[in-house]
Image (cartoon, helix red, strand yellow):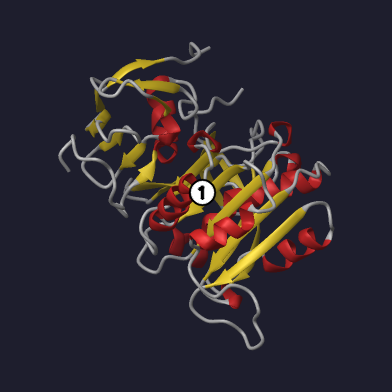
Amino acid sequence: MPADEPMDTIDEQMLDGNAVGGMLIGLFGVEMTHVPGRCANCHKVSMVGALKAYTRGPGVVLRCPWCGQVVMRLVHRGDEVLVDMRGAMLLRFPAPG
Amino acid sequence: MARLIDWQLGTLTAVRDETPTVRSFTLSLPAWEGHRPGQHVDLRLTAEDGYSVERSYSIASEPERGAEIDLTVERIPDGEVSPFLHDVVMTGDRIEVRGPIGGYFVWEAALGGPLLLVAGGSGVVPLMAMLRHRYRMSNGTPARLLFSSRSYEEIIYRDELDEMARHGDGLEVIHTLTRSQPPGWTGYARRIDEPMLAQLLESLAQPRVYACGPTALVENVANALVRLGIQPDRIRTERFGPTGS
């Protein structure tokens, strides 16, 4: 889907950011689904759990529920994780304790 | 102290049939530190050759149960994990669990209401944790559950939901049966739609909404509720993906 296309169609493969909560805890060390994040494209704030999650590809893609732009890409490759967060302007969460 | 990201071993202590294709599994978790209604766990199964597979399952039980949780799982015939849970695992077996996970799709009595819960099929599971918690806390928050099932026999938690609604503490359960209805059925017999939701909202002002089920159902419900004037930030969704995945 082109990033500038409004998300007005139902994509049956789509899940919520909530669905990858376990993976995100593994990466960030804290519960992330209720963390607010600001989309770098439309500047609207959504909780990570409310992002639209696409998990059927080789990695996980999280998109902004407002504008559809990609906020995060996460890919497991062997024993590495590649994280592309250029679509997330800001994430604000408690420091892992 | 068990950290969230650590896998812990749970012991299966009970299995209960909910419908012909849905079962509840009780796991005893000595290191469990409690959960919030609506959260889920990741389950990991590892084969002898090291191949492992993870799946997320919503917790069905209320936090007041302590160091055990119920997971309610629908058997997906071509699935990797659910047939194993249904057909192979027996009480006494140990299963790896990580969690609880999720702080977004969560309701606790302190959050208040009124509550509008909308479920399609096994999407009722995390909502059941909320309703059981509400019931155990004698909370009395006005609540409606709109629950879409294919047939009467496939209504998960049917008896328990009836009993909770009969208790008369402000919970109403509204069923719709989309594929077949028993003789004399007077309830809804179609997919959840905007008129159905509009009717519910007549008696429920600006509810907190939790909708869970197949992606298409959840999407339709969320869009219809926004059109009906519910603020988007009052609506929390959990999508399961395509039906039968």
Q: Which residue is mark 1?
A: B228
Q: Quadrant of the C terminus of chain B?
A: bottom left
- Decide: is B193 above or below A58: below
- Decide: is A40 above or below B202: above
Residue B73 screen position, x and y as percent: 53, 59
Please identify the quarter of the rendering in which residue B172 is found.
bottom right
Q: Is residue B125 left or right of residue A38?
A: right
**Residue drawn at 56 percent across, 57 percent down:** B197
Q: Residue furthest bottom?
A: B183
**Residue drawn at 39 percent across, 53 percent down:** B215
- Name the amino acid, label 1: Leu
Residue B87 screen position, x and y as percent: 49, 67
Q: Is residue A72 left or right of residue A28?
A: left
Q: Quadrant of the N terminus of chain B?
A: top right
Q: Is residue B142 visible?
A: yes
**Residue drawn at 60 percent across, 77 percent down:** B153
Mark 1, Cα crowd under 10 Å, few <14 / some 14-19 / many 20+, is some
Residue B3 screen position, x and y as percent: 54, 25
Please identify the quarter of the rendering in which residue B29 is found.
top right
Q: Is residue B34 left or right of residue A76?
A: right
Q: Is residue B170 left or right of residue A7?
A: right
- Decide: is A96 above or below B228: above
Q: Nearer the viewer, residue B56 or B108?
A: B108
Chain of the residue that carries numbered disc 1 in the rendered image: B
Q: Residue furthest left?
A: A2
**Residue drawn at 42 percent across, 55 percent down:** B220
Q: Is residue B60 visible?
A: no
- Helix or strand or loop: what does disc 1 sit on? loop
Q: Nearer the viewer, residue A15 or B96?
A: A15
Q: Nearer the viewer, residue B79 or A95?
A: A95
Total count of labels: 1
